[in-house]
Amino acid sequence: MPTTSKVINVAPSRSSTAMDGKHLSNEAIKALAMDAATLAKMGVGMPRINSAMRNMIAMDSITQPVTTPSVGTPVQFLQEFLAGLVYILTTARKADTLAPVMTVGRWSDQEIVQQVLEHLGAPGLYKDHGDLPLTSWNLTYDRRDIVRFELGLQQQILEDERGQAIDLNSAQEKRAAVALAFEILRNEVFFNGYTTGGMRTYGILNDPNLPNFVTVAAGGGGGTEWSGKTVDERISDIVTAIQSLRLQSGSNIDPKSMALTLGLPSNVVDLMHDVDGPNTYGYTVQKWLNENYPNITVEAIPQFENANAGESVFYLYAESVPGTGTDDGRSIYQLVPAKMQPLNTVQTVKGFDEGYTNALAGCYVKRGYAIVRFTGV
């Protein structure tokens, strides 16, 4: 049978009242602490302790260490933060390099309309008694729809104060996010338009005034892509585009004297500086262009990559054609009634809400004859 433990003492309560409220002086406590039997009743077993050891032991001593060993200095006291914020990168927005922004109309308008006028009439042989040929004109209206978008932010008190703790203005960063989102959208509409629901809001890739795409000639290797062509073959493609632009405009565009833009896909543009073996003079396409057509500016356009049924495209166009209207003669515009305007700010119990909107009419090609488009590069 198991051995029954001997009960030495039972303390009925931890309160002084239950212990008859006895008050012990320091001398009495010290005398009790020196008595092994008394210590045993208190649960402190020291039956073989000698007098020298009793004098060395304090009753409130605790065996060290009690805490778990750890790093002496928390890591947050050993961190140094670099100044400023690094924003996540987005694809380059190239709309502004291809066409200026025309702020026109109001946010609440439905359409933007361009009047296009054609002069009619042809001289006839003179006759004393014949009818005099007369001139006339024909006026048409080119219409573009305005599309509106909206975006907002919500700011709460707790979020705001926690942002301040890390030196970050939360509401300001959210407003910056709204502005960035609207700019990305404006760029997207400029290139691709917004034709959902029959909207006449077009982009530079699908405006109805644009000429059709022309496939570039195949190179000696059998393909049309610039990555497989020689420098001379790439130059030949550009010469073909320049010639097409001159003929298409009835020689109203002179590539030698007028400002032109060559928009190339971003994955092709660096081949303008490529040197290959067959080119014995060490020419690059860019060097040839600088010497022969210094008025042509080259732009890298990521949206031109794989833009036409999976094939990359390039555009060559005159920025303006003087003397072809009572306007400024520009070939391409971004029509933007409102980049970003506030709707309202509403105070809430825990913060505030803000709303913003914009209005876009996309890309408008005013002079389609001033642009040529090639695909297959």
Image (spheres, helix red, strand yellow):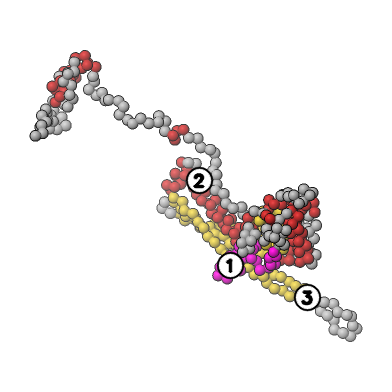
* Residue 178: x %, y % from top left: 53, 54
Residue 105 visible in the displayed image: no
Q: Nearer the viewer, residue 206 or 80?
A: 206
Q: Secondary structure at mark 2?
A: loop
Residue assigned mark 1: 195
Q: Secondary structure at mark 3?
A: strand
Amino acid type, mark 3:
Leu
Residue assigned mark 3: 120
Please state which of the two labelled residues, at mark 1 or mark 3, is closer to the viewer. 1
Residue assigned mark 2: 169
Question: Which of the marked residues, 3 or 2, is nearer the chain's N terminus?
Answer: 3
Amino acid type, mark 1:
Thr
Residue 220 visible in the displayed image: yes
Task: Give the main secondary structure of the magenta stretch.
Answer: loop
Question: Which of the marked residues, 2 or 1, is nearer the chain's N terminus?
Answer: 2
Q: CA distance from mark 2 to mark 1?
A: 38 Å
Amino acid type, mark 2:
Asn
Q: Nearer the viewer, residue 77 or 22?
A: 77
Question: Residue at image x 76%, y 55%?
Answer: 232
* Crowd around label 1: few <14 · some 14–19 · many ≥20 (10 Å): some
- Name the outermost residue toward the right: 128
Queried whether the magenta region covers residue 284, the answer comes back as: no
- Name the outermost residue toward the top: 52
Horizontal arrangement in the rendering, residue 275 relative to residue 60 (left or right): right
Q: Secondary structure at mark 1?
A: loop
Determine which quarter of the picture holds residue 255: bottom right
Please state which of the two labelled residues, at mark 3 or mark 2, is closer to the viewer. 3
> Residues in magenta?
190-215
Question: Residue at image x 47%, y 53%?
Answer: 154
